[in-house]
Amino acid sequence: MGVKLDWDIEAEKGKHKEHKEDSKQRSSRYLGVFRLFVTVIVFAVILGSIAYLVSRRWEQVNQQLETLLTDTVQAEVAALRLGDLTAFEERQRSATADWATTQRQTYDEYQQLKQSSNVVLSGRIVSTEIDGQRARVQVEEIIDGVPYVQTWFYWRYDSEGENAGGWYHVPPDYTFWGEESEINTDRYTIRYRDLDAEAANLLDESLNRWLDDACTYFDCGTLPFITVDIVPIPNVSVQWQSTQQGTWQLIIPSPYTERARADIPLDTELRIEIASLVAQNLIAHTSNNITPVYASDATYLQQAMTTWMVGRFVQMNSEAYLIESLVNNYGTEVPGTVQRNLQPTSSINLVATATGVSSLAELNVDWRDFVLWRLELEDDLIERGELTTWNSLYDFSDPAVQSAAQQRYQNNFTASERTVLETSISTSATGTPQLVARVNVTRGFESGEEIVVFNLINGNWLRAN
């Protein structure tokens, strides 16, 4: 039997002892935790209440400011509607007198507009943005049944002596146009500010569709990347800022710098301007950026291709009859073939070559716009006094034709308006293929129909009457 030491015995005894906390101590500890918990909750409730009250007060102040702004705008519109110049001018304010002059002109324009059009100045506010003391408001107006918006700017003045405080209409603030944003694709980037978001989205849809369509007819493999900037700058036209190799930069003014369509901010007129510039660059690019020689058929072909492309972009009849009929009758690859082979002095025979047809007379196409271009070119050459170039458009194998043509040139026999009604292919008594056009012509106060005939000479149409 072994010997246990005293400390071993005491250790074993300790194993059987349990520490018991005094009930008063336990209650005190629980009460302390509970009090802390209640304190935290009360503090959080107080902070939340303060935040809520501040938020509610802030909302009330903003609501009050917006209500005052709305009242100011509607009073201003009512003055325009009623023709009250004094009331209208009372809501205008600026550091210079120029704004007063500008707004007086605006007032006069509205009064004239009311006389010439069906104008509804409802004063309905389409959108409002308040930033401190400045505000931006878009106001609806309906002209001849079409909804528009005007974008106006206001400043909240404090009372100063005889000048009452409140919101006043001030000159446009083009820095107050929203945050910068972008739409990015692998072919283009559209940069804009928030106010122009709808216009940017519409442009994105259009530009994507335009490029898809153009690439159906032309090789877009080397097409430069396009950057489009919608800028809040007034009195700026749509223009290419840069067309350097590898990149194109297009500048488009924000539609809201002036009266803009409420339903379609990118309206038809602006879309045609944009489409025209895009088409011009696309068509020039597909011909390796050649510069056609004036009076050559290459000039017509470049213009006709561009006009045809614009018509496709904006989905309207561009009257580019020759190119349209080439595509319809000979396939989508023909425009690209014409452009790749276009030279500065190319003749119209290039279209026959591009289709694989042996002669212009065998082409199944609509010649109306080509005939019109040739006749207008004749008039332009007469006005310029370029007789040699003018003579090159004629077949003078018949002396009678030469005599009649010279008489027209000397008498400055030009037209103010022409419409080519129809064209047809025939053959002369000597077996020469002819292009015959029936043309409605206006000269001065007289109008009538004329027959214009072209002979096919060495692969080119030359006038023969």
Image (cartoon, rainbow, N blue to C red):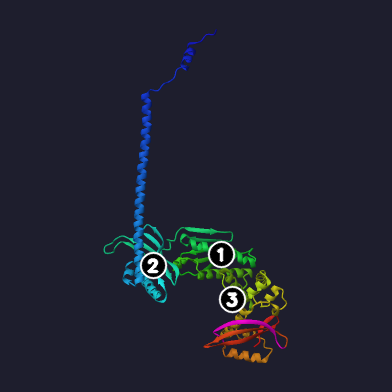
Give the residue at mark 3: 319
Q: Amino acid at mark 2?
A: Ser
Q: Main secondary structure of the magenta part?
A: strand
Give amino acid for label 1: Leu
Mark-to-mark CA distance, 3 and 1: 22 Å
Neighbours of disc 1 within 10 Å: few (<14), some (14-19), many (20+): some
- Left or right: 217 as drawn, with respect to 45: right
Residue occupied by mark 2: 122
Q: Earlier in the sequence, mark 3 or mark 1?
A: 1
Which secondary structure, mark 1? helix
Q: Which residues are magenta?
A: 414-429
**Rendered location of residue 408, percent (x, y):** 59, 89
Residue drawn where x is 36% and y is 62% of the image: 70
Q: What kind of residue is marked 3?
A: Glu
SS state under label 3:
loop
Task: Answer with mark 2 or mark 1, whichever residue precedes in sequence.
Answer: 2
Depth order, front residue of 164/21 = 21
- Vertical relation: 176 (above or below) 412: above
* Quarter of the rendering containing residue 368: bottom right
Question: For mark 1, what is the residue?
Answer: 207
